[in-house]
Amino acid sequence: MEDRHKECLKSNRDFLCSNISLSTGLLAKLSESGVITDEHLQKLQNIKRNDTTKAAVLEFLTEVLPRRAPEAFNLFLEALSESEQEHIADHLKKWLGDICSEDAGTFKSLRAELRSHYERRLASIRPMPWQQDIYLNLTDVFVERQLKLKTNYKGDERIVTMDDLFTPQQTKEIPRRLLIEGNPGIGKSTICQTLAHEWGKQSCGRHCRTLCVHSFDLVLYFHAGDFIDEESVAHAVQKHLLPSDYSITTSELQGIIKAKNVLIIVDAFDEANAGNRTLDRLIEGDILRHKTLLITSRPNFLQNKLSLFDSKFKVEGYDIREQLQHVERYAAHQNIASAPFESMLEEESIIDLCSNPLNLTLLCLLREEDTQLRITRTALYTSIHRIIKQKAAKRLNLIEAEVEESLLRPLYRFAFEAHRKNETVVGENDFKKVKNFQQVCEVGYLTRELSISRLQPEVRFQFTHKTFVEFLTAKHIAEMDREERLNWMQHLRYADYRIRIKELAIDDGFYVEQNEPILAFLFGLLEEESAELTQMASLVIKETHFSSEHHPISFESSCNASHQLLRLLAELNVVPPELADVICKRRPPLINIHHYCSDSCMKGMLKLCNLRFQPPIPMNLIVRYVTRFNPFRAPLLIYIRLREWDEGYIPY
Ligand SMILES: [Zn+2]
Ligand SMILES: [Zn+2]
Ligand SMILES: [Zn+2]
């Protein structure tokens, strides 16, 4: 029997005991429709005879009816109507009707509140955190993304569009746990934002389909950090999605979430996964198992939880067509000609930056500011950083050196501290230590706006993007003295590991790539200081066993710790001679190129080839899998292969 029916019987118990007549007619109808068995019938008649009708009715209401099948309640109402007790059935129906319409009212106003919240708050994106007044209209600039769906355990993939997000895949069941993985700045948050914003608009018009985001009664849009210290999803909704004067009780909210078809979107798992018990339980299906949960994360953070997801997607970088669409929309939005942006896409030096939406937006901004284009990620962020510094100096009426000394250095330290805790926020206690904190904020990297939360227990400042935290952290480390910096590096992990003991429910893992966003910036920032750079590279060479002989290449091999040096070299414009010497002396007997090698790994290999070691380092490659390479990378790969052939080595 349904909960609300049980509730109805309980609330009206006194009325029912006083008014129901256990007539032969009623009992006959009840046993005819199977609501009571012959034993029940006998028992009720015994109680009626030996005690009172009231006692028999009470027995029926508490011991018999609630334990029968779900349809028993309605059969009971029918039996009442057909045995001249229709007024009792009407009384119960009215009670249920009142409750339902009250529920419906609560639900409708909650839905309206969330819709208007998303419509207002998620309508724009601010890619340039130092200029909150510059924002792009989400609907204008959003480029429909392609997602790669992993179709089996072997890693086969196929391309789907965002329309297919909620479509049942090979199991034919509606997916309940969905994961979208992608690199920093690739547009995961924008996808989440678009979904919630779309839902806020009520319908997507002609292409609204059964399984689009509008098929959900409610969409709850969170940042992973919203669940920290919240004991349930309902608590998180109250604190982060509803204004504090919105009147709804936690149990009403829980009731609605339980009864309705709900989509829970949780952005940035990688930014707030430590000690996040409620989020873990949600992913594991320990709570709200039958609700749809969509999580986004950078790769390699969900290792031990991957198997819990029904559908796993990967957001790829922009292809040429999407890049073009992105710059066209950017130009149209800013109301300027798109030609300079389009020609930018063809510049050899920045081609690999253009596939990342965040970087591409920043490049557009630089192009608008007429800055010379930069060729590595570090150089790009350094240019952005310089613009921020210039603007802050002008605004605060200081010279740039003062901004650097008194405002930016504290900021680098904040970033370093925040990154160490894997956070992107600065808490009250931290910023109280700096006397000119207000000015530090005005530089522009920090905003008061904490994702979309409305109620905050303490004032906190948010770094607008994790990539900026990493860049600023690297700035802090770059300014350390050598000993301190090497000490910091010593404490990083340089080996991948995976521990899995099923019996003890232990499942833990680490991939060295997790350290690379910062290390790569650090390499880029210290490019000119060749002694420091060489020291760092030597440490990486030693810790990752770059020089040693590796396992024979096979289909399963991957771009792992031993390729870290290559991936970091990609961040340099030129490998300084001092470093080239060290690499030459400690080069490995052989380098395996895997079909999983990343773009930066390829770029690093090319740098290595350009050093023209004598004799050259042989490279291994399974040619059979070349077709599996991204077509945009294939020319680079073929180039590496030809170079090696030129120099007399033929890969097998
Ligand atoms: Zn729709
Ligand atoms: Zn190896
Ligand atoms: Zn590699």
Image (cartoon, rainbow, N blue to C red):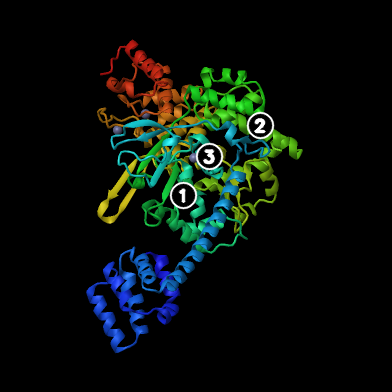
> Horizontal and vertical percent for residue 304?
34, 47
Name the amino acid, label 2.
Ile
Residue that mark 2 sits on = 387
Name the residue: 39% across, 51% down: 283
Name the amino acid, label 1.
Ile
The circle on residue 239 is none
Question: Badges 2 and 1: C-beta atoms under 8 Å apart?
Answer: no
> Horizontal and vertical percent for residue 205?
53, 37
| Horizontal arrangement in the rendering, residue 420 relative to residue 640 (left or right) | right
Residue that mark 1 sits on = 264
Mark 3 lies within 8 Å of ligand 1 (Cβ measured)? no
Viewer-proximal residue among 62 and 301:
62
Viewer-proximal residue among 407 and 505:
505
Question: Badges 3 and 2: C-beta atoms under 8 Å apart?
Answer: no
Instruction: Point out the tag, 2 or 1, that comes first from the N-terminus.
Output: 1
Q: Compared to 605, does 541 lie above or below?
A: below
> Horizontal and vertical percent for residue 319?
47, 24
In the rendered image, the residue lying farthest to the bottom is: 50
Residue 439 placement: quadrant: top right
Viewer-proximal residue among 522 and 502:
502
> Horizontal and vertical percent for residue 616?
34, 17
Mark 1 lies within 8 Å of ligand 1 (Cβ measured)? no
Name the residue: 49% across, 62% down: 100
- Whether residue 270 appears in this view of the structure is no
The circle on residue 194 is 3
Name the residue: 44% across, 80% down: 14
Helix or strand or loop: what does disc 3 sit on?
Answer: helix
Residue 358 placement: quadrant: top right
Q: Quadrant of the C terminus?
A: top left
In the rendered image, the residue lying farthest to the left is: 39
